[in-house]
Amino acid sequence: QVRLVESGGGLVQAGGSLRLSCAASGSIYGINNMRWYRQTPGKQRELVAAVTYGGTTDYADSVKGRFTISRDNAKNTVFLQMNSLKPEDTAVYYCNALVVTGANFWGQGTQVTVSS
């Protein structure tokens, strides 16, 4: 089992920045990819950014150039630096870990609200 705890969400004005963190604990040695998803009411959860154990990253088109995902393998933590935030970035952001067995684990989510 892997436990994920997100932090760093909050309320920010459009154009501002936030940094989300996700700390993993438990059976962390099997973690491969780590991802950030987001979800708004009535919509499906969407992939925002992903990072492999080796540091290769990928982003949704809607956040490219504004968000940066990174991870500290020594501290078992993944980050999402969000700059130039827009009201449409408002969502609950979830951390996800994919382990080598193929199992997925999720955090509890953190609310990000961007006011116009």
Image (cartoon, grey):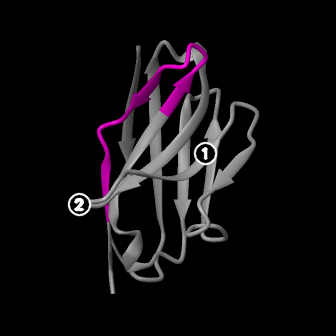
Vertical position of residue 89 compared to residue 87: above or below: above
Could you tell whether 2 is left or right of 90 in the image? right
Q: Amino acid at mark 2?
A: Pro
Task: Report the span colored magenta.
Answer: 97-112
For the point 29% across and 61% down, which residue is it?
Answer: 40
Residue 90: x and y, percent? Answer: 34, 68
Q: Provide the secondary structure element on which disc 1 rests.
A: strand
Q: Which callout, 2 or 1, points at the residue further toward the start of the chain?
A: 2
Could you tell whether 98 is left or right of 90 in the image? right
**Residue for badge 1:** 50
**Does the image show residue 116?**
yes
Quadrant of the drawing holding the C terminus: bottom left
Mark 2 closeness class: few <14, some 14–19, many ≥20 residues within 10 Å: few
Observer-side mark, 2 or 1, equals 2
For the point 68% across and 51% down, which residue is it?
Answer: 58
Q: Provide the secondary structure element on which disc 2 rests.
A: loop
Residue that protrudes farthest toward the left in the picture? 41
Taking depth in this image into account, of 95 and 45 the one nearest to the observer is: 45
Q: Quadrant of residue 87?
A: bottom left
Number of marks: 2
Res. 15 mark = none
Q: CA separation, marks 2 and 1?
A: 22 Å
Residue 39: x and y, percent? Answer: 34, 55
**Does the image show residue 10?**
no
Residue that protrudes farthest toward the bottom in the picture? 116
Residue 47: x and y, percent? Answer: 50, 51
Vertical position of residue 76 compared to residue 64: above or below: above
Q: Amino acid at mark 1?
A: Ala
Res. 41 mark = 2
For the point 63% across and 36% down, which residue is it?
Answer: 72
For the point 65% across and 42% down, which residue is it?
Answer: 51
